[in-house]
């Protein structure tokens, strides 16, 4: 049977795992050993400190994605795999951007941008501003692009990867 | 009452019914060995190398159905297990491997003989864990045995720091265990079974493709009945061979790179491929896009991740092979496929696997003699031509079993596996079929076999080459025999592809080698001597016998499906 030529698509997985030494290595190792690429992975303890919860995003075809879910499910340390790709979820990523060597007019521009895009100015001095953006991965991409265009070679960005949780109302996304 | 970690370890082994422990001591395992000293219920086997140790445990496990249990020290003791862990993982063999470890307080300090064995083995075992608290010890061992044996079996690694071994704590060993992330499938989805039967009943050209999963599940009898009721012919993978008697009228042969004509063609032409317990790896499928192109594919496997991994499956059934086959059998009925079956059987008759005997003694004759002389036996193979010939010519049924490293293809597997098999089955004849290359990868185990007085028959098919690679070099690399001649000496010309009388004598001299271990060695050069040699070896009950068969140097394994070819695009003769 011909290998299906599915198109690549962005996927989201929520993973409940044992909160133990080596589990993160097991999960990331599983991805690398099978040549699956991770776009982002976040991990943290849940309300139950024996369980960690990961949010993983990746880009793959349907068939590979099915295989990834099965492989994850097979790991003894994995308690539950939930596919978030096509269900209503809330997802947010924390992004810090520092803009360096700002003139006073740059400052004004940055504060304006912050207001429009719901970005928090968390710190600043005479010529530097630190912005805190809590948005979706896509929107954070746009913000980085915009600031890089306005302040080329002067921005420094660090992002944490997305965390996601199922929506309460089915319409909200 | 509080007991030491080492004492709980011994208690746990007893509760798990472990009778045989394959173990090699060292600094970080010495406390465990002390606790084992004088234990009457557990026989401790001391192989001569940790790699052989784990292969022996593997052979023991495959031939008894019990878990094989290993104990080694930290560092090199642990890393020497790696090849054996991967071997067992590929072929789904239940092993529990205990590795000593430096005290938990020293982990990460680059202490003497410290390695992160859990990190190293993570991708090649079913589960690996370091015991970090004494109170977890009992539960972790219980978990390890359960995980190793249940679902799709596999190797488990337990890393045991020395301070945990020495620490006092609860003597309680749990009777049951609940693992929230591990729930192997136990039932059968009847809806899927019904669908599968509907497809089967509609088929005009159906075949069963049977893999190692059926042997692991012990479902040979059920499968045979299912085949007989439906009349559907049975094809096996190397690992599935023997699930139905190879002499059964519905048995076609092995599929794959060195499968027979009838099997590969039947798979290519079938309209329904009913596969059970297979992985569809590349040696089986050949060119994926031309594999069973016209077939509806049904796949039964206990491991959901094996389904639709390489081949898209139309009807997946996640279940234990035995339960699934039993369930299928209840509603199975005879199919009207006489023409199809007789076409396959005509192929089988017209294109048998057979070796040209004009040059003299062939591996086929040697293996057929085993068929004739040893009806109740366990035959282990090494890897390479010796293995492929064995999978082609050895007849299997409920009394004769074959152990082989099918997935990883580990040279050095055969001999230690035979030791493990003999220890687990003292009443059976155990024969190891190896090549002159593979036997040297664990030849030191002659000491183990001799010391334990294990009457194993070791057949060395000596062609003076790493024969399988040499064959590929002959067929696909213009006969450039690069690093494959084992007769090569400094005095030889650098590049040689003309083996002949002028070649230097083989080293080692396997007969003298056998004798140096106090074992028996027989060298055979002629066909007429084969039977006599086997009878002499069989009569030697006090230790191992090496029979060195001087086979034709450039004999090939045929037929062959060259890599990348479709399954029915085979080279039949060379």
Image (cartoon, coloured by chain):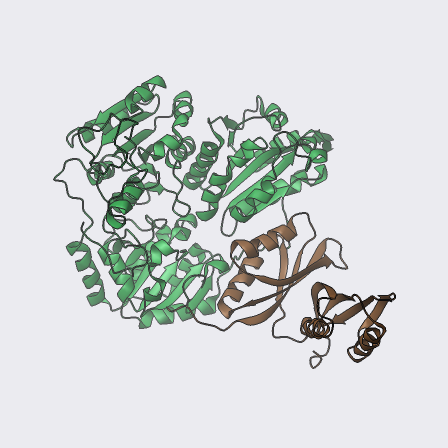
**Furthest residue toward bottom:** A171
Front one among B490 and B395: B490
**Furthest residue toward right:** A126
Residue B154 percent coordinates (x, y):
50, 46
Front one among B38 and B107: B107
Front one among B222 and B252: B252
Residue A33 percent coordinates (x, y):
53, 53
The green-coloured chain is labelled B
Q: Is residue B65 left or right of residue B464?
A: right
Q: Is residue B115 left or right of residue B472?
A: right
Residue drawn at x 43%, y 47% is: B91
- Do we see residue B171 in this rendering? no
- Do we see residue B62 in this rendering? yes
Residue drawn at x 73%, y 64% is: A157
Q: Colour of chain A?
A: brown
Work out whether B476 lies above or below B315. above
Residue B272 percent coordinates (x, y):
32, 67
Residue B376 percent coordinates (x, y):
30, 37
Residue drawn at x 65%, y 48% is: A22
């Amino acid at each position: 049977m011909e290998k299906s030529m599915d198109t690549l698509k962005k996927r989201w997985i929520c993973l409940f795992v044992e909160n133990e030494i080596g589990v993160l290595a097991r999960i990331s190792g599983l991805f690398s050993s099978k040549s699956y690429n991770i776009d982002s992975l976040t991990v943290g303890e849940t309300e139950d400190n024996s369980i960690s919860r990961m949010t993983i995003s990746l880009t793959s075809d349907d068939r590979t994605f099915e295989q990834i879910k099965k492989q994850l499910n097979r790991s003894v340390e994995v308690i539950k795999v939930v596919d978030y790709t096509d269900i209503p979820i809330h997802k947010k990523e924390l992004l810090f951007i520092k803009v360096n060597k700002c003139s006073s007019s740059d400052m004004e521009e940055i504060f304006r941008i912050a207001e429009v895009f719901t970005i928090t100015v968390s710190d600043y001095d005479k010529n530097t501003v630190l912005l805190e953006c809590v948005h979706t991965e896509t929107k954070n991409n746009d913000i980085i692009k915009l600031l890089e265009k306005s302040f080329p070679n002067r921005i420094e960005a660090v992002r944490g990867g997305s965390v996601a949780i199922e929506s309460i109302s089915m319409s909200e996304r | 009452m509080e007991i030491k970690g080492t004492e709980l370890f011994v208690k746990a082994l007893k509760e798990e019914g472990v009778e045989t422990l394959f173990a090699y001591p060292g600094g970080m395992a010495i406390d465990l060995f002390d606790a084992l000293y004088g234990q009457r219920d557990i026989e401790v086997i001391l192989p001569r190398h940790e790699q052989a140790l784990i292969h022996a445990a593997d052979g023991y496990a495959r031939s008894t159905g019990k878990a094989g249990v290993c104990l080694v020290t930290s560092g090199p003791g642990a890393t020497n297990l790696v090849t054996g862990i991967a071997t067992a993982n590929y072929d789904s063999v239940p092993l529990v491997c205990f590795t000593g470890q430096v005290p938990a307080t020293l982990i990460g300090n680059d202490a003497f003989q410290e390695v992160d064995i859990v990190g190293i083995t993570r991708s090649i075992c079913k589960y690996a864990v370091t015991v970090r608290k004494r109170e977890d010890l009992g539960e972790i061992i219980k978990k390890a045995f359960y995980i190793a044996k249940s679902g799709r079996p596999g190797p488990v690694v337990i890393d045991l720091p020395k301070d945990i071994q020495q620490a006092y704590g609860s003597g309680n060993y749990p009777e049951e265990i609940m693992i929230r992330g591990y729930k192997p499938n136990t039932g059968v989805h009847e809806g899927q079974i019904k669908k599968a039967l509907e497809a089967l009943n509609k088929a005009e050209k159906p075949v069963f493709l049977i893999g190692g999963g059926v042997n692991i599940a012990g479902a040979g009898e059920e499968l045979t009945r299912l085949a007989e009721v439906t009349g559907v012919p049975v094809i096996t993978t190397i690992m599935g061979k023997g699930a139905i008697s190879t002499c059964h009228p519905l048995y076609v042969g092995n599929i794959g790179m060195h499968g027979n004509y009838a099997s590969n063609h039947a798979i290519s032409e079938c309209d329904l491929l009913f596969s059970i317990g297979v992985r569809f790896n590349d040696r089986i499928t050949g060119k994926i896009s031309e594999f069973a192109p016209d077939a509806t594919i049904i796949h039964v496997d206990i491991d959901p991740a094996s389904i639709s991994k390489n081949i898209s499956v139309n009807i997946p059934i996640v279940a234990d092979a035995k339960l699934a086959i039993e369930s299928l059998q209840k509603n199975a009925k005879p199919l009207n496929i006489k023409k199809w079956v007789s076409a396959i059987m005509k192929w089988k008759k017209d294109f048998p696997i057979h070796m040209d005997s004009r040059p003299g003694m062939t591996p086929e004759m040697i293996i057929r003699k085993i068929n004739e002389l040893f009806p109740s036996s366990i035959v282990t193979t090494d890897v390479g031509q010796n293995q492929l010939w064995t999978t082609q010519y050895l007849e299997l049924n409920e009394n004769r079993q074959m152990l082989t490293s099918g997935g990883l293809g580990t040279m050095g597997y055969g001999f230690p596996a035979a030791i493990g098999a003999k220890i687990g089955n003292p009443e059976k004849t155990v024969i190891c079929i190896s090549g002159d290359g593979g036997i040297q990868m664990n030849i030191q185990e002659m000491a183990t076999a001799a010391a334990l007085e294990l009457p194993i028959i070791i057949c060395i098919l000596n062609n003076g080459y790493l024969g399988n690679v040499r064959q590929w070099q002959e067929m696909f690399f213009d006969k450039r025999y690069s690093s494959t001649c084992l007769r090569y000496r400094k005095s030889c010309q650098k590049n040689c592809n003309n083996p002949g009388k002028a070649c230097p004598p083989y080293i080692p001299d396997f007969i003298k080698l056998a004798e140096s271990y106090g074992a028996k060695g027989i060298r055979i050069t002629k066909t007429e001597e084969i039977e006599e040699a086997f009878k002499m070896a069989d009569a030697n009950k006090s230790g191992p016998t090496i029979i060195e068969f001087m086979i034709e140097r450039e004999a090939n394994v045929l037929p062959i499906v060259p890599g990348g070819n479709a399954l029915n695009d085979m080279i039949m003769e060379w």
